[in-house]
Image (tube, helix red, strand yellow):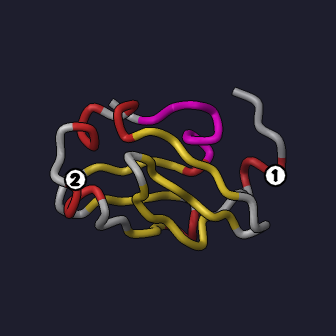
Amino acid sequence: MKYLVAELTAKAVKAWYEKQQICIRLEDEREIRFPVRKNSILKNAPVDKVSNIEIICGGTGLHWPELDEDLTVTGILEGRFGR
C-alpha cells in the first residue's frame, strides 16, 4: 500500500469519546472522528471503557486497555476502524 509522508507521520496528541464518536486531535491540529459503531469491540462496550483511551507508539496508535483493542492513526485516516 502506498502512503503519503503526511499519513506516515500523522500523530495523535489527544483522544476522547464524545457523543458516540471517537475523537482524535492530531499533531498538526486537525481533528478526526469516527462513530464507535464502526468497531465491533467499541460499539458493544460500556461508555466508561470506551472513554478510557491511551495514545501509544509515539502518537501513531490508540489503545483501549480494558477492551484489549488497538487502532493506528494511519488506519483510521484510511477508514479502517478495526474488527
**Which one is nearer the viewer's eye here, 57 or 44?**
44
Residue sitting at x 81%, y 52%? 6
Q: Amino acid at mark 1?
A: Ala
Under circle 1, the secondary element is helix
The residues tagged by marks 1 and 2 sit, at their Cα atoms, a distance apart of 28 Å
Which residue matches tag 1?
6
Of the 4 image quadrants, the one containing the N terminus is top right
Name which residue lies at 22% across and 56% down.
47
- The residue tagged 2 is 68
Label annotation for residue 34: none
Front residue of this view, candidates 60 and 20: 20
Image height of 66 relative to 75, above or below: below
**Residue drawn where x is 56% and y is 47% of the image:** 33
Task: Classify residue 13 as left or right of residue 3.
Answer: left
Q: Disc 2 marks which amino acid?
A: Asp
Label 1 packing within 10 angstroms: few (<14), some (14-19), many (20+): few
Residue 73 in magenta stretch: no
Q: Residue 9: x percent and y percent?
A: 74, 58
- Which element is circle 2 on? loop
Position of 64 with respect to 62 (left or right) is: left
Report the span colored magenta.
74-81
Q: Position of residue 79 (x, y in %)?
A: 58, 31
- Quarter assignment of residue 78: top right
Q: Is residue 79 magenta?
A: yes
Q: Which residue is at a point 67% across and 63% down the rendered structure image? A: 26
Precedes in sequence: disc 1 or disc 2: 1
Which quadrant of the structure image shows residue 40? top left
Query: Nearest the camera: 57 or 53?
Result: 53
